[in-house]
Image (tube, rainbow, N blue to C red):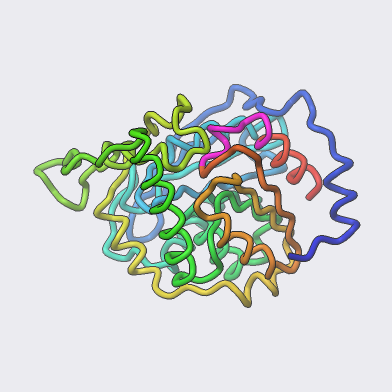
Amino acid sequence: MVLTRAIVAAVGAVAVGATVGAASGQERELDIDAGDTVLHVHAFGPANAPETVLVVPGGPGLSHEYLLPLAALAGDKRSVFFYDARGSGRSGSSPDLGLDAQVVDLDAVRKASGATRVHVLGHSWGTVIALAYARDFPERVASLVLVGMGAPTAAADRKSFGAAFAARKAALQKLGLVGGPPTAGRRGPAGDPATQDCMASFNAVLPVHFADPLHDAARRLPGSFRCGLQARAIAAAGAWDFRADLARLDQPILFLIGDTDANLAGMTESARRARVGITVTLEACGHFPFLECPGEFFPAVERFLRAF
């Protein structure tokens, strides 16, 4: 990780103002053409705002609803755009789930926002798409906020996250705080496996993602989870590797992660490689810091966005 004195001074000097969390009462939903599919978009804040944040969902396969607390970042001069990735939520399906297609989708959301340059906030799997977008369209990215990111390569990410998550899950199972997931999810129209909603299974292990497994938010994540999409999207993304990209990108990057997140070790390696990176580790917080630790999460993100 490279953290210059100028960046430290800039971030440290920015105070969190009273307008944080004001969405200006402007909320809208739209469906946009992404070429081979249609994406559902949910936006907050004024149209044509001077500053725009694009939020990239995790999973893959999770719809955007669980991220809606991030609408608190909208204000009089900033809009926040959420969307359902192709094949998830209310967006249309497509046989192409590759990373290139996901990047094109994100740029379609940018165009719909009316912004030339945007801040991109990715959560979990969304950090992979966010980094790929910054790599392919650096001129369109003002900054990156990578929440709960893992290792900088696909192989290392699977290994480090898998081991940490399995160990924590086993520990919580011994305490009786996590049981076995349901054997089947809720199927979509006509029992189509591609539209199966496995949110019940996801929620069964959701406490593993929290520092406090008894936290209210660890009971149920809103939205839907297309588990059939997840495996196919990960496979289609291939053996991505951002090691060289992190060293080359000159956009400021905020790596924000909870200290009990299973991605912590992997994120540390990613941040170490960043040319311009700031790391914020939140104590007693897990993989969903905007739900579990909002009092620490939002000021950190707001200071970063205002500095850059």
Where residue 212 sits in the image (x, y, percent)? 50, 33
Residue name at image x 53 percent, y 59 percent: 150
Where residue 173 sits in the image (x, y, percent)? 34, 40
**Taking 47 as reference, is 228 above or below it?**
below
Question: What type of secondary structure mainly makes up the magenta span?
Answer: helix
In depth, the one of 278 and 81 nearer the eye is: 278
Residue name at image x 18 percent, y 38 percent: 186
Dividing the image into 4 quarters, which one contains the N terminus? bottom right
In depth, the one of 212 and 230 nearer the eye is: 212
Residue 52 left/right relative to 223: right
Quadrant of the image occupied by residue 242: bottom right
Number of labels in the image equals: 0
Range covered by the magenta-colored residues: 288-297
**Taking 302 as reference, is 242 above or below it?**
below
From this viewpoint, which residue is outermost toward the left?
190
In depth, the one of 24 and 195 nearer the eye is: 195
In magenta segment, residue 101: no
Where residue 278 sits in the image (x, y, percent)? 74, 55
Residue name at image x 33 percent, y 68 percent: 235
Residue 109 left/right relative to 9: left
Residue name at image x 27 percent, y 50 percent: 227
Residue 186 left/right relative to 142: left
Residue 116: tell me if it is visible: no
Residue 225: tell me if it is visible: yes
Where residue 69 sits in the image (x, y, percent)? 54, 31
